Amino acid sequence: MRRTLLILRRDLRLALRQGSDSFAAVMFFVMAVALFPFGVGPEPNMLARIGSGILWVTALMASMLALERLFQNDYDDGSLELLALAPLPLEAVVIAKIAAHWIATALPLIAAAPVLALLLHAPAEILAPLALALLLGTPTISLLGAVGAALIIGSRRGGVLLSLLVLPLAIPVLIFGVGAVEAALMGLPARPYFLVLAAFLLAALPLCPWAAAAAIRQALE
Amino acid sequence: MTRFTGDDVACVRGERTVFFGLSFQLGAGELLLLTGPNGSGKSTLLRLMAGLSRPIGGRIQWDGEDIAAEPERHRSRLQYVGHADAVKPQLSVKENLGFWASLARDGVSPGAAIEDALAAFGMEALRDMPSRFLSAGQRRRLALARILVAPAALWLLDEPAASLDDAAVQALDHALQSHGANGGIAVVSTHIGLAGETATRARVLDLTPARARPVVGTLA
């Protein structure tokens, strides 16, 4: 546990010093969402209706951007080998790296989402459900993405491959994430959607680090 | 009595047999030098010894127990320096070393050990420098300082002398000597000769294909 926190702290410090990866993801998110009113026309009703979908899809794309380098940097400079040889299970290393990645990239996205929702003319009552849905959904996406990121270690043009591998798996999260916001919009209870999102997270939490660690071992052979 | 042994080890990379029928026996305080031309499998053998990959045939054992049986126990007794330096350019020299030190050690604060390791490789003055300004030789020194911050019974060093200057090679030599004096085992791959006593004390395992194959388990 102490060692897991140590890796988490190191990765956060690296993300903070480097900055570019998580900053790029947030800027991509803001930029892509800001483009939609130009593309579909600035009609407030239309934007309010499709707003939650836009936010979720672009948030998903933005997290793919940053996930590509999750293990690659450590693999390139030899750190991943040493982390695999450290006296803690590789699964714990993976969990620490995912947690650091989520804090560094997904939290800023979640913070930006309500602001962008207002930009899309979304009614104020969906802001809280939107943030909560993202809060429950993005960890699952990071976990799924970690499996993809571990599988593409060492491959060229890994980013495209990563999206092809991970995005189909993220569809259920997308459906229920958007569903929660839509339900709030129509005044229906959003709770069932949150529960399903939480269930996805609980299923991914033990399975994904295990799969990602197996993929990393394979890559290091 | 600590014993690190390999018995009839074989390794295949891709479709090519890198080596087979390779045996070695190391007791406490002994140093094994791996020699041979590029591509003869020195790094591969070190990775097998670290447990990063598995041999396709044969056994590698520590005190009679296969290293794959208890991978975590094996990992906690070894220090590995690969050909990559694992130095993060965004962190300072001390932060880089500090991370690996606290990761390897149990509980105790590694402060003093970090200072000692930096001093051993003449890096004290660079303590707070961002690692992105280090030269290749300095990064190598930093990677080697890592093996001193946490005590380990087994050192596996892949071409440790690459891009080191004379002073640093001497420091490495000295580190290997005191490691041996404390009963530690070291396996070092090199095509550059190590200096002085370390070299004379060392046993040599030549992986040159023509020499390694006909004589099963060469140990000069």
Image (cartoon, coloured by chain):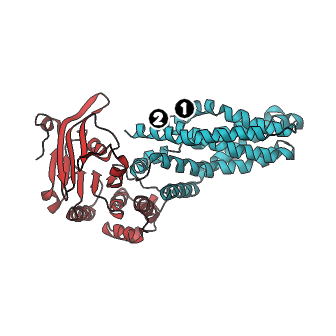
Chain colours: A cyan, B red
Q: Position of residue A194 (x, y in %)?
A: 73, 41
Q: Is residue A159 above or below residue A26?
A: above
User: Which secondary structure lies at badge 2?
Assistant: loop
* Few, some or many residues within 10 Å of mark 1 (<14, 14–19, 20+): some
Asked if the residues shown at circle 1 and circle 2 are in contact, with their CB atoms under 8 angstroms apart, the answer is yes
Q: Label 1 sits on what residue type?
A: Leu
Q: Which of B219/A115 is in front?
A: B219
Q: Label 2 sits on what residue type?
A: Ser
Query: At 84% across and 42% down in the image, what residue appears?
Result: A122
What residue is disc 2 on?
Answer: A155
Task: Say which chain tag 1 marks.
Answer: A
* Quadrant in the rendering for residue B139: bottom left
Q: Is residue B102 above or below residue B112?
A: above
Mark 1 or 2 closer to N-term? 2
Q: Which mark is residue A161?
A: 1
User: Is residue A96 at all visible to an observer of this figure?
Assistant: yes
